[in-house]
């Protein structure tokens, strides 16, 4: 063990000798502490027997910042002279200090015998050790709770154990220097006698176990004024029972009785008196069992009474009869039950009695206690409450009744003990690491205690006992809130003292050391309860690095690659200082960071990654991370390929080295970008005869798009950031080729091609209407080609008309037209699929009647028309006369 600190004071006084003290000792080693000497480059520690100082048995050398160290190879129970010398760079002695101390005794032989005095007490026998001044007996129960007892000789009694519980026992010897390591453990159970044999052929063999009989569970009743019957369930393996009885308050007179049955009738007792009874059983070997708890029983007080009656007494006086009603006095009441009650926060004693239904007249009941408490009740009630009462009080309660004839005798006394007072003077003794004992003052009139232990994290534990102590598992670094309640037949005590206790600091658990870079350790651990500061120390053969922090994490930097460091995390606080006994952890620094990362594109979905190797026995992992997931490759060389890269993706590429010590720092990152994706879908919608809208689905990685429509009659092109483009100069009835370039933010391009596009047929021009015979109308136009059919629609306010022209025709006739109306006329070519072109111009015509209604079928002449543009540029109006 080596503990070092940085210089806090560059000047230390060298006038006095080094102060040396013993921190701890075992049978074969001693840990020393000494004061630092300014200018010392090392410290040399020498151990020599006190009776032979010229013959050292061991030495150790420590660095200039070390103030605590261990010297080994000692013999047990020997007095040594320890010398600490401060040396300069020339190995000259600057200062020197000495101390005499003994090593701890040697390890004890295992315990010889363990006997049970009763179900809660062990009698332990062991062999004494020369040089030992005392001994520590360590017990561990099945829940791994540990208790330690300091004893001076053998045999030794160990009290306040859990009944009929198996314990593991070991023993340590102690002298002025320290304590030995524990002996080999033995196992024993409370309530048994166990002998252990220790030789070369039979090791730790348990022989002849026997059981101390448990106590009988007594119950009692009083069948008459002068007798009590005691009974109990049979105790296994019991051959006889011994019982004793004495009158409460007269415990100098005992009645004792031995029997092999399970009941006992005691007669000749005083009426209405309280008697105390206890007993125990005997086993076939004549060993006495454990005593039962005391029980109380009062003898009955059943007196003969005159039944309450009504008499009519009459006199003949002065020639007249005079009659009177005479009542006899009431009988003595009998107490039925006494119990504790609470009313508005005050404790009281509720007393109930048996009502006498044969009593004539009005009755009054009077309840009295020898503590000057009274209460009254009428014949309509059979109970009343004595209040207030305190804890742990003994009350002798009597009941009487009265009517017009006078009072009755008082009932037999009933002894009632109120609920006990709360235990006081709570204290905690930490008998050994992880095991504490809670003690309290004895409380009178108590049958049992329950201790409640609540840990700061919410964990709770309780302990039921008849003694005034309780052992519990006190985990290091926790704060405990403890209280104790006392119980008797009346109930539990009120809430009492709450004790707040904090255990010693824990060594941090879960210490994790990771090499986060080539020169840095990150050390993490679980929080130690009660710790306010952590000292983290890393040391190798040449340097010591310290880190002080309040958080359970520390980074130690400026370390070298592939070096082995010893790391210790020490918890501290202002109350108990620092726990210097925490163990060290060894860690090797992580591999170095790869350098000179280079990316070479092999094809659209593959890049080669290379770097400069600078580690031994390292595995390199190349990682490309982006929104499209992660791609990796591994190698023990200096290059590897990243494949299956999607289009339109950005990746951050880095390389990290892994060795048995862990991960190194990742290399500096390089950005990798693949070409943008082409849109999956593209749609061309013709808006007008010469204008089309091209739209497409989003393309990953694409920032702008260049879309081109190309034909033999010309081409159209647009460059946009949107997902659509409006393109003009489109020739109707023409086939176009569609191409696109998708361009990323950085200028990477992807060429995309799609199916061709055919513009719609051209709309006809020169649309004219001519009146025909038999109320018909001819629509005429000039067509752009002979491969399309045309449909003509006339929509009026009263009737609608249509006619269709076959391919090659440029007119159609509408029969039976209704004159005197305004019609909207549109002539539209049909696509090969039969759908109409939607953007041809509409015209409005007014058809007038000449002489008669055109709708009757009569002819009319159209000699002239007037053309005017109305509504919109695509709508025209003509009037026929």
Image (tube, helix red, strand yellow):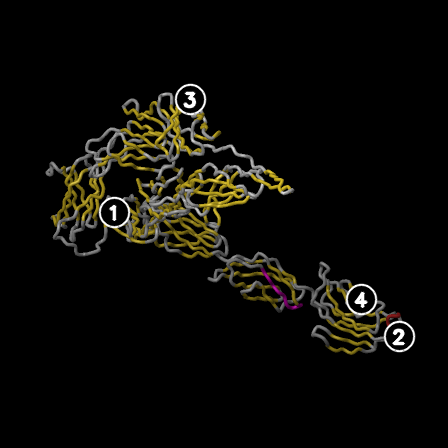
Task: Out of 413 and 472, give the one closest to the viewer.
Answer: 413
| Residue at image mark 2 | 852
State the CA–CA distance, disc 1 to disc 2.
Answer: 122 Å
In primary-sequence order, the first of circles 3 and 1 is 3
* Cβ atoms under marks 1 and 4 closer than 8 Å: no
Distance between the Cα atoms at labels 3 and 2?
144 Å
Q: Residue at x 80, y 67 (%)?
A: 800
The answer to whether residue 110 is visible is: yes
Q: CA distance from mark 4 to mark 3?
A: 128 Å
Sequence order check, earlier mark of 1 and 4: 1
Asked if residue 768 is among those painted magenta in the image, a careful observer would answer no
Q: Position of residue 399 (x, y in %)?
A: 48, 40
Q: Check if mark 1's residue and mark 2's residue have beta carbons within 8 Å.
A: no
Q: Residue at x 89, y 76 (%)?
A: 851
Q: Residue at x 10, y 38 (%)?
A: 54
Nearer the camera: disc 4 or disc 3: 3
Residue 674: assigned label: none
Is residue 225 shown left or right of residue 379?
left
Q: Which residue is mark 4?
A: 801
Residue highlighted by disc 1: 540
Give the residue pinned by disc 3: 260
């Amino acid at each position: 063990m080596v503990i070092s600190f940085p210089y806090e004071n560059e000047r230390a006084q060298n006038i006095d000798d080094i102060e040396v003290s013993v921190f701890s000792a075992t049978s074969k080693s001693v840990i020393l502490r000494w004061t630092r000497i300014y200018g010392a480059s090392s410290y040399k520690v020498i151990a020599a027997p006190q009776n032979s100082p010229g013959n050292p048995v061991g030495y150790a050398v420590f660095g200039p910042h070390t103030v605590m160290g261990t010297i080994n190879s000692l013999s047990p129970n020997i007095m040594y002279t320890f010398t600490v010398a401060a040396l300069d760079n020339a190995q000259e002695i600057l200062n020197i200090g000495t101390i005499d101390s003994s090593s701890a005794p040697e390890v004890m032989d295992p315990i010889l015998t363990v006997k049970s005095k009763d179900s809660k007490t062990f009698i332990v026998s062991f062999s004494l050790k020369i040089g030992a001044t005392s001994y520590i007996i360590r017990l561990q129960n099945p829940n791994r709770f540990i208790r330690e007892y300091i004893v001076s000789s053998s045999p030794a009694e160990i009290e306040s154990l859990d009944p009929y519980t198996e314990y593991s026992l070991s023993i340590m010897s102690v002298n002025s220097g320290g304590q030995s390591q524990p002996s080999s453990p033995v196992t024993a159970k409370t309530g048994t006698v166990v002998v252990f044999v220790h030789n070369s052929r039979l090791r730790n063999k348990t022989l002849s176990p026997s059981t101390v009989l448990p106590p009988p569970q007594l119950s009692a009743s009083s069948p008459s004024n002068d007798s009590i019957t005691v009974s109990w369930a049979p105790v296994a393996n019991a051959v006889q029972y011994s019982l004793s009885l004495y009158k409460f308050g007269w415990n100098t007179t005992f009645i004792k009785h031995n029997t092999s049955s399970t009941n006992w009738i005691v007669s000749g007792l005083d009426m209405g008196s309280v008697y105390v009874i206890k007993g125990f059983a005997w086993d076939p070997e004549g060993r006495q069992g454990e005593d039962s708890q005391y029980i109380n029983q009062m003898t009955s007080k059943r007196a003969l009474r005159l039944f309450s009656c009504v008499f009519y007494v009459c006199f003949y006086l002065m020639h007249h009869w005079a009659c009177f009603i005479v009542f006899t006095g009431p009988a003595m009441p009998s107490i039925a039950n006494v119990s504790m009650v609470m009313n508005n926060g005050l404790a009281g004693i509720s007393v109930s009695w048996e009502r006498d239904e044969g009593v004539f007249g009005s009755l009054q009941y009077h309840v009295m206690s020898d503590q000057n408490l009274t209460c009254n009740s009428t014949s309509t009630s059979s109970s009343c409450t004595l209040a207030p009462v305190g804890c742990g009080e003994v009350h002798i309660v009597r009941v009487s009744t009265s009517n017009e004839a006078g009072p009755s005798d008082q009932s037999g006394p009933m002894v009632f003990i109120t609920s006990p007072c709360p235990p006081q003077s709570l204290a905690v003794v930490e008998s050994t690491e992880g095991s504490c004992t809670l003690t309290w003052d004895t409380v009178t009139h108590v049958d049992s205690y329950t201790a409640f232990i609540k840990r700061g994290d919410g964990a709770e534990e309780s302990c039921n006992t008849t003694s005034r102590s309780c052992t519990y598992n006190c985990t290091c670094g926790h704060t405990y809130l403890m209280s104790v309640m006392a119980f008797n037949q009346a109930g539990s005590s009120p809430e009492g003292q709450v004790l707040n206790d904090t255990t010693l600091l824990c060594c941090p658990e879960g210490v994790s050391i990771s090499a986060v870079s080539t020169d840095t350790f990150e050390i993490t651990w679980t929080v130690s309860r009660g710790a306010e500061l952590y000292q983290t120390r890393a040391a190798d053969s040449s340097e010591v690095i310290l880190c002080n922090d309040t958080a359970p994490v520390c980074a130690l930097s400026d370390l070298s690659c592939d070096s082995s460091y010893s790391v210790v995390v020490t918890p501290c606080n202002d109350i108990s200082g620092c726990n210097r006994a925490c163990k060290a952890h060894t860690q090797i620094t992580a591999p170095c960071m790869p350098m000179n990362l280079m990316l070479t594109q092999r094809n659209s979905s593959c890049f080669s990654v290379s770097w400069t190797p600078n580690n031994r026995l390292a595995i390199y992992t190349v990682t490309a991370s982006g929104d499209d997931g992660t791609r990796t490759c591994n190698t023990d060389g200096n290059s590897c390929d990243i494949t299956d890269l999607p289009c339109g993706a950005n990746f951050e590429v880095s390389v990290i080295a892994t060795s048995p010590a862990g991960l190194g720092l990742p290399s500096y990152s390089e950005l990798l970008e693949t070409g943008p994706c082409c849109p999956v879908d593209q749609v061309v919608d013709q808006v007008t005869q010469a204008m089309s809208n091209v739209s497409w689905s989003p393309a990953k990685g694409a920032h702008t798009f260049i879309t081109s429509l190309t034909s033999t009659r010309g081409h159209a092109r647009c460059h946009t950031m949107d997902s659509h483009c409006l393109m003009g100069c489109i020739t109707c009835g023409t086939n176009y080729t569609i191409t696109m370039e998708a361009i990323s933010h950085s200028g990477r391009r992807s060429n995309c091609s799609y199916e061709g596009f055919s513009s719609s047929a051209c709309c006809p021009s020169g649309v004219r209407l001519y009146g025909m015979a038999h109320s018909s109308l001819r629509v005429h136009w000039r067509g752009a080609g002979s491969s399309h059919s045309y449909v003509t629609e006339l929509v009026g306010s009263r009737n609608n008309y249509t006619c269709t022209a076959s391919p090659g025709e440029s007119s159609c006739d509408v029969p039976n037209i209704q004159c005197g109306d305004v019609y909207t006329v549109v002539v539209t070519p049909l696509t090969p699929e039969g759908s109409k072109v939607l953007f041809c111009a509409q015209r409005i015509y007014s058809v007038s009647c000449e002489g008669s209604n055109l709708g009757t079928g009569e002819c009319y002449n159209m000699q002239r028309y007037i053309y005017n543009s109305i509504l919109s540029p695509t709508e025209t109006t003509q009037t026929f006369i």
